[in-house]
Amino acid sequence: MEWIKGLFKRGSTSRESGLNKELTNVHIETELAQVQELNKTGVIMIPVWQTCNDSLVCDICKSFHDKRADIYEVGKRPKWIYKKTGKEYGPPLCHEGCRCWLNYEADIN
Ligand SMILES: [Zn+2]
Ligand SMILES: [Zn+2]
């Protein structure tokens, strides 16, 4: 199962800040749909929030950086809970100007 681990991993380099928001959104949605399909076959991939990790990242996104989804069920959208407010976010993009994306980790028991 080792190969699956690296399947959806991307480099940790920051994305182009000028990257079209809509394109990013479509990309995340497409990827999530693929992962959900994979999950149905018994291979559980957990979404992990990734930020550009620079000074422009807001407090909310920063608190989610490198964090697995707090709520994640097959067939449902992943959610991350912002501890300060208890509000649920996700998946990226969670707000205007958000540049975050998702990585996926295999959940191997
Ligand atoms: Zn943010
Ligand atoms: Zn963000």
Image (spheres, helix red, strand yellow):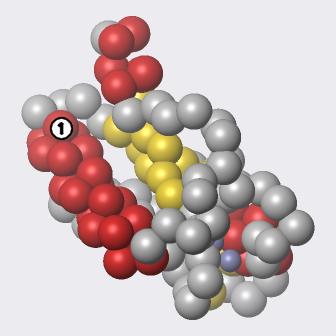
Residue 14 vs residue 34, the one in the foreground:
14
Question: Is residue 52 left or right of 68 when viewed as pictured?
Answer: right
Q: Quadrant of ligand 2?
A: bottom right
Give the residue drawn at x 80%, y 83%. 84
Question: Is residue 31 left or right of 9 when viewed as pictured?
Answer: left
Question: Is residue 95 left or right of 90 when viewed as pictured?
Answer: right
**Few, some or many residues within 10 Å of mark 1 (<14, 14–19, 20+):** some
Whether residue 37 is situated above or below residue 27 in the rendered picture? above
Whether residue 23 is situated above or below residue 58 in the rendered picture? above
Residue 103 spot, x, y in % from top left: 49, 44
Give the residue drawn at x 53%, y 80%. 94
Q: Amino acid at mark 1?
A: Leu
Question: Is residue 71 visible to us here?
Answer: yes
Residue 26 spot, x, y in % from top left: 28, 68
**Residue lying farthest to the top in this orientation:** 2
Quadrant of the rendered structure where residue 75 is? bottom left
Question: Is residue 3 left or right of 9 when viewed as pictured?
Answer: left
Give the residue drawn at x 36%, y 77%. 22
User: Which residue bears the numbered disc 1?
Assistant: 38
Give the residue drawn at x 57%, y 70%. 18
Image quarter hosting the C terminus: top left
Residue 27 vs residue 64, the one in the foreground:
27
Question: Is residue 88 visible to us here?
Answer: no
* Secondary element type, mark 1: helix
Whether residue 76 is situated above or below residue 11 in the rendered picture? below
Quadrant of the rendered structure where residue 42 is? top left
Residue 61 spot, x, y in % from top left: 70, 70
Image quarter hosting the N terminus: top left
